[in-house]
Image (cartoon, grey):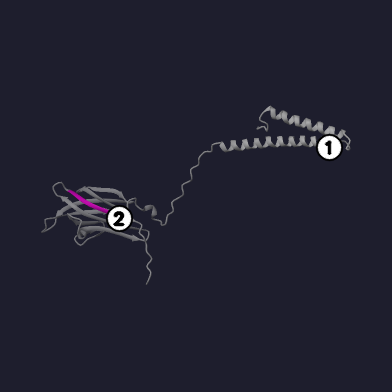
Amino acid sequence: MDKWFANKGQVVQVVCAVIAATISLMVWLAIPASSLLYYLALLAVMICLGSLVWMVSAAYTTEHLERTTRSSLIPTSPTSPMPSPPILSSPLDKLLPIAPIVLTNVACNIGGFWERNISGKDIRIIVHSIKKVREQDNYRADIEIRGAGSLHGGNDTQSISSARYWVNRTSTPFGSEPSMLFSIEIHPYGVTIFTLRVDHIDPKSNRVNLELCVVRGQPEVLDAKSG
C-alpha cells in the first residue's frame, strides 16, 4: 500500500505541527479575552492549523502524482487492429483474377492433355489427333476444351461436339479469327473471354503448340441515357 509520506522527516513535521497547535490552543483558552496575549495565542493556533493542513495536502498531492505517473509508465500490450472484412460489390468479386489478362503457350502431344487453373477456371485441353487439310499445305488438330464455358469456333473450324473442334494451324495471330476457338461470357458482375489458336503442328513428333488467352475481370458499367 502506498504511503503519503516519503520519509520520517515529513512525519516529524506533522507531529510537531499538531503539538504546537495543541499548546497554542491551550494557551489561548487559558488567557483572558481582554489580554493582548489572547489575540497572539489565537494567531498562533491559526498558523499551526494552517501549517498542518498545508503539509497534509502537499503530501497527498505528491503521492497522487507519483501514482499517476507510475500508472502511465506501465507498458501495455500492443493491440493490432482487426482486419476489416473485404467489401464485395458483387457475388463474383471473389472470383476475379489476379491478372486480368493471361496469355500462354501450351505444348501438348497427341493423345495427351494440358490442365491448369487460369483466372479461377480449371481449364483442360485435350489433343485427340491431327490430320492434313485437303488441297492445302497445312494441318489441323482435333482439340477438346473443358472448363471454358460455351465454346464456339470460327468459320474455318469444324465442330465435332459442343466442346470439341477441328482447328486449322495459323502461323500468325493476325487475321486468325476464322481458325480460332472462343468463348465469351458477359454480365454486369464479370466478363470472361477465352480464345485458343493452333500455332504449330509437328506431324513427326506428334506435337501441337497452342496459344491460349484468357481475359477475365469486372467491367465498368455505364448507364445509358437518352439524349
- Camera-near label (1 vs 2) is 1
- Residue in the image at 32% along x and 51% along y: 99
**Res 33 → quadrant:** top right
Q: Residue furthest bottom?
A: 227
Dot placed on the residue nearer the N-terminal end, 1 or 2: 1
Q: CA distance from mark 1 to mark 2?
A: 103 Å
**Res 213 → quadrant:** bottom left
**Quadrant the N terminus occupies:** top right
Residue closer to the observer: 227 or 129: 227
Q: Give how far across and how far down residue 29 sits, in percent.
A: 86, 34
Indicate yes or no whether the magenta region holds residue 29. Answer: no
**Quadrant the C terminus occupies:** bottom left
* Image side of residue 43 versus residue 155, left or right: right
Which element carries disc 1, helix, strand or loop? helix
Q: In the displayed structure, would residue 86 be above or below residue 47? A: below
* Image side of residue 114 versus residue 54, left or right: left
The residue segment tinted magenta is 207-216
Q: Main secondary structure of the magenta part?
A: strand
Q: Residue furthest front?
A: 36
Which amino acid, mark 2?
A: Val
Q: What residue is disc 1 on? A: 39
Which amino acid, mark 1?
A: Tyr
Q: Which mark is residue 215?
A: 2
Q: Give how far across and how far down residue 68 sits, in percent.
A: 61, 38
10 Å neighbourhood of mark 2: few (<14), some, or many (≥20)? some
Q: In the displayed structure, would residue 78 be above or below residue 125? A: above
Residue closer to the observer: 77 or 71: 71
Q: Give how far across and how far down residue 181 sits, in percent.
A: 24, 57
Which element carries disc 2, helix, strand or loop? strand
- Residue in the image at 23% along x and 52% along y: 211
Q: Which mark is residue 219?
A: none
Q: Give how far across and how far down residue 107 sits, in percent.
A: 21, 48
